[in-house]
Image (cartoon, rainbow, N blue to C red):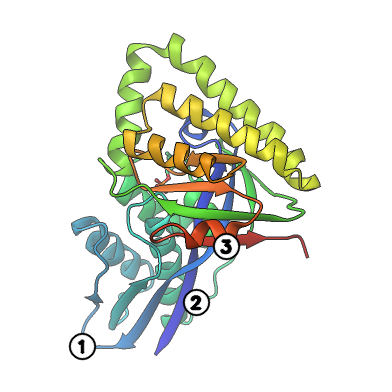
Amino acid sequence: MVEARAPGKVILLGEHAVVYGQPALALPVQRFVTVRCEPAARFQLATKPIIGGDALEEALAELAQEFGGPKLAVHIASELPLSAGLGSSAAVAVASVRALALGANRKLDDAQLLALAESMERRFHGRPSGIDHTTCALGTPISFLKGEPNRVEKLRVKKLALVIASAGPRDASTREKVLGLRAEFERDSRRLEPLFAEIGALATTGMAALARGDDAELGRLMNENQKLLTKLGVSTEAVDSLCVKLTKLGARGVKLTGAGGGGAVIALHDEPERLAGELPNAFVSRWEDA
Ligand code: PMV
């Protein structure tokens, strides 16, 4: 029996704009997807999370071929809410690659792990920027710039705690949200391009704020980012009203995280555990440079 895991992630600043070549900042969360493989008569997905549907089966079958068709039963368990903007599909991809590599006695370097996880993510999301699976695979806060190749740098984080709360189910998948915005971009790139550039500038400013542990500035940047995400049309009434509620409860900054349309919201608050205790299904994630 072999087992591997990968964390989920939050995007602190820069989702959607990252698809259009702007920088974005992402952090792994302390909640994991675990993939366990056991010897079996043939390769099979034995325990499925409710994610990916046929795409998950197909992606795993393709991955199994990469590893010489091992006879394994694959069990996937997730501590992450699915399709909430917390990178559950990327964590499934990364943990699956790790587990199958272990099962096949193959050692992978980061580049091989990222390439295989990316091809699984493409099956789930079409053409993702790559920020999700890169964060989940490296397991460290990163700044990410899409390109050929992507530019990935480890972020300095003096000290940060975020409350991760739920604004309820999403109204569409990541793929649909990204494609919807792409259609809008093709209709009206002159309106969207400056919004993407503003979001990218927030992410760039955020790097220095994170490094010096400046929560006042980070909160401001998150609120600005949320306003721009609303202008992009990816926020919802449920997200907006949760943002208002969290701000009234003292949050310095609040925004949706991931593709939007509902799902997870992140909040920066001086007493994160107390805030999380007041919300259903909320939890706290922390980061600090060693
Ligand atoms: O909703 P998630 O966790 O899959 O995050 C998607 C992030 C986007 O920027 C909206 C898409 C992407 O590929 O970067």
| Residue designated by label 1 | 41
Q: Is residue 122 left or right of residue 22?
A: left
Asked whether the viewer can see residue 204, the reply is yes
Query: Residue 1: which disc?
Result: none
Quarter containing the C terminus: bottom right
Quarter containing the N terminus: bottom left
Residue at horizontal 39 percent and vertical 37 percent from the top: 241
* Residue count near mark 2 (Cα–Cα under 10 Å), binned few <14, some 14–19, many ≥20: few
208 versus 92 height, above or below: above
Query: Residue 106: which disc?
Result: 2
Residue behind label 2 places its C-beta within 8 angstroms of ligand 1: no
Amino acid type of the residue tagged 3 in the rendering: Glu
| Residue designated by label 3 | 273
Q: Where is residue 94 shown, x and y percent of the image?
A: 45, 64
Q: Where is residue 170 shown, x and y percent of the image?
A: 29, 45
Of the image marks 2 and 1, the number of the one nearer the N terminus: 1
Q: Quadrant of ligand 1?
A: top left
Amino acid type of the residue tagged 1 in the rendering: Ala
